[in-house]
Image (cartoon, rainbow, N blue to C red):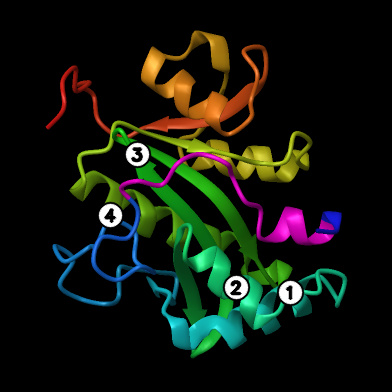
Amino acid sequence: MPKAKNETLRACPERSRRVAQGDKLDLLSLEDLAEEEMAQQQGVMVRRASVSDADRVAAFVNQAWQGRAGVDRRMVLERLGAVGFLLAERDGNLVGMLGWQVENLVVRVTDFLAWPAAESAAAGQALFAGMEQAAKELQCEVAILFLPRSIPPQMAEFLKTLGYTSQVVASLPQAWREAAYEGRLGSDDPVFIKRLRTDRVLRPI
């Protein structure tokens, strides 16, 4: 797959045993969230993606990447089968997307795209808020961001405003390190994380 595709719908090799119970496109079957709208922030609505969104998502990615991504419906459906996706919309227009998985109480954020630039902050805040809300319902301990190794300084600063901090993988607790290793990060690599609960679960729930 060309580099642009990898960076846009970036697959992570980690297992997804606990992804999509029931509806294969939903992350861990979020029945506890009764409303489809999971977050509203600065006029941006966030909801879970469905099969019917595949064409819109492909068009959104290609438009954001000015045709360089070459993403089609089939690619989107394959990605939706591997991770849960949240979509951010303003006035019915798609302005952002976030892909995530959960395993062993660790959230892995594997995909993120907000466009156009004027919508980046609002869409990003709403998407991360929606993801974190659902993750807390699942009693997740931490969110780990699997980002390109080199990100713009503005992105790093934005993540810090959301409470994410950069830490070296080797310094993380074992379960979190294992999640990072499964995402092909090395012990000396930095990774952005956010702790979602103050206490750690030391045995399975």
Left/right of residue 121 with respect to residue 64 in the rendered view: left
Q: Earlier in the sequence, mark 1 or mark 3?
A: 1
Identified by mark 3, the residue type is Glu
Q: Quadrant of residue 29?
A: bottom left
Identified by mark 4, the residue type is Ala
**What is the CA distance from the residue labelled 4 to the residue labelled 1?**
28 Å
Which label belongs to residue 76?
A: 2
Q: Which residue is mark 3?
A: 103
Q: Which residues are magenta?
A: 4-18
Q: Looking at the rendering, in which quadrant would you find the C terminus?
A: top left
Is residue 125 at least partly visible in the picture?
no
Q: Could you tell me which residue is drawn at 73 percent across and 74 percent down?
A: 71
Is residue 106 at least partly visible in the picture?
yes
Of discs 4 and 1, which sits in the foreground?
A: 1
Q: Earlier in the sequence, mark 1 or mark 2?
A: 1
- In the depicted structure, whether residue 194 falls above or below residue 181: below
**What is the CA distance from the residue labelled 2 to the residue labelled 3?**
22 Å
Mark 1 residue crowding within 10 angstroms, few (<14) / some (14–19) / many (20+): many
Q: Kindly state the secondary structure of the residue where label 2 is placed.
A: helix
Give residue 56's position: percent from left, percent from top.
59, 86
**What is the CA distance from the residue labelled 1 to the residue labelled 3?**
27 Å
Mark 2 residue crowding within 10 angstroms, few (<14) / some (14–19) / many (20+): some
Which label belongs to residue 145?
A: none
Identified by mark 2, the residue type is Val
Left/right of residue 109 with respect to residue 186 in the rendered view: left
Q: Which residue is mark 4?
A: 134
